[in-house]
Image (spheres, rainbow, N blue to C red):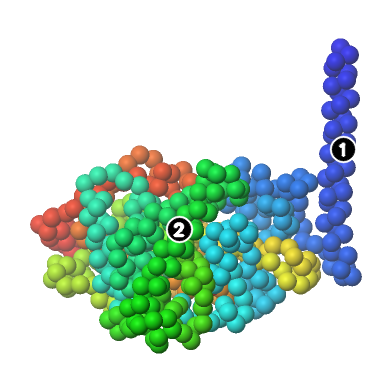
Amino acid sequence: MAFFVLAAVVLTAVCILASLAVLLFAKRWDAAGESRGKKLPLPPGSMGLPYLGETLHLYSQNPSAFFAAKQTRYGEIFKTYLLGCPCVMLASAEAARFVLVTQARLFKPTYPPSKERMIGPSALFFHQGEYHQRLRRLVQGSLGPDALRALVPDVEAAVASTLAAWDGHVSSTFHTMKRLSFEVGIVTIFGGRLDERHKEGLRKNYAVVEKGYNCFPNRIPGSLYYRALQARKRLRAILGEIVADRRRARGGAGAGEDAPIGGRVDLLGGLMQPAMALTDDQIADNVIGVLFAAQDTTASALTWILKYLRDCPKLLQAVKAEQMATYEANEGGKRPLTWAQTRNMTLTHAVIMESLRMASIISFTFREAVADVEYKGFLIPKGWKVMPLFRNIHHSPEYFQDPQKFDPSRFKVSPRPNTFLPFGSGVHACPGNELAKLEMLVLLHRLVTAYRWEVVGSSEAVEYSPFPVPRRGLQARLWKLDDAHNRVAQAASSA
Ligand code: HEM
């Protein structure tokens, strides 16, 4: 009995102390609004437990459910505390535009230092101002329409070899698509003139970096994070060799412009131009950064597209009919796809757009307020993280009718401004969006005209790696169709 009384007393004391801590914590944040001499209130919302904030809530459930529940309770702007940082979340198109476009100078990009170290601190997405603009112009140029037109045969070749390797067996769609997006990333950066030894070295070490990227940062030998740091050093060394080889090939360091291949300068050639005045570390950080930005995002989107098409047999037939017309125009796939043809795949393009909306691969992004900012009568204090919630915007019935329905026909008309943000918006919007779409169009063309695929097992659950993908990467089997099958199918669909 005495034991139970003692236990009750201890428990009560713990509860009182915990409540006091929560009150003090809440008071501290409430005071933030006034401490800077402004009378503006902080946005509504809960800061959760002291120090932990709501991190456990977020990670113990589907993140979309976490954000959606908050939005229902507090509206388009609310505060929380995640991963050691006070945050303001913004769930409306207008707020996203405020942070990313009209008042972008008040919000700087921000990433945890461990992640910045892993990718490389000079990668463009960590920066603002002149350095960012200079790099961005270059990256946009190497991913612009002229460069992409010349890249179509390389993307086609990468798609063909990826699907040929998948033919006849069950594989994770996501892992297969990762191989494809890595190949396309490599050819975009190195212009197809990377020797196999260097490519293999990049592939192997990059995979180790990826495994450790989201792990708790530490220096314990053998841990995934530590191994990733070691692999990052090896990546830097390999890139150093590639840069030195190129310099030798063009006659010494700083010896003028890189020779264009097939009329285009690849991204590495652009980064090495003397006018860019970049150090080898800066070049390596940006190469790794672009590879990183390009791979899992595109692979995850492609995986969702395949799932959505598998779930809608009628739509798949319609996409197939659209692609067969191009296939026939190219003499049964004997002539290569052209850039113009990829720009004329209306239904397939709408399927891609709708998949990007539904899946919202990048559910939100992070910025940090560089000054106290007022938004709709609320204070966003300097130093707080600010997160425009793309997924909430894409799934809002205010912007998209019946938002949980997969309906590509909604893209017959353009979405309202700032409501469709799969590639972000403003100065940091994705410069690789057209390349990603090209990759998807070419993959879909080849897949539906030359193959049949079947999902194996359940695909309903979602995993976060960290991008959302169907369970186990969507296990699927692929078969090559023969021409006779295609002719019969074509005749049936046009009958
Ligand atoms: C479906 C595929 C992709 C999606 C959904 C996607 C999404 C995004 C988003 C939302 C941003 C902006 C992030 C922010 O504002 O914080 C971004 C930035 C970026 N993306 Fe992509 N991306 C994709 C593919 C690619 C590809 C293929 C490349 C390059 C080959 C690429 C390179 C970049 C770079 C370099 C940035 C940083 C731009 C800057 O800071 O100025 N992305 N991407």
Foreground residue, 475 or 394? Answer: 475
Residue 38, position in %: x, y?
Answer: 87, 70
Front: mark 1 or 2: 2
Report which quarter residue 161 is drawn in.
bottom left
Task: Give the mark nearest the N terminus, 1 or 2.
Answer: 1
- The response on whether ligand 1 sits within 8 Å of label 1 is no
Q: Residue furthest top?
A: 1
| Residue 387 position in % (x across, y down) | 64, 62
On the image, numbered disc 1 is attached to which residue? 17
Mark 1 residue type = Leu
Q: Quadrant of residue 255?
A: bottom left
Q: Is residue 133 left or right of residue 36?
A: left
| Picture layout, residue 114 above or below residue 426 | above
Q: Can you tell which mark lies on residue 234? A: 2
Q: What residue appears at the point 82 percent right and 56 percent down from the top-left corner?
A: 29
Q: Is residue 418 visible?
A: no
Residue in the picture at 43% in, 44% down:
471
The part of the image, by quadrant, that contains residue 235 is bottom left
Asked if 394 appears above or below 339 in the picture, the reply is above
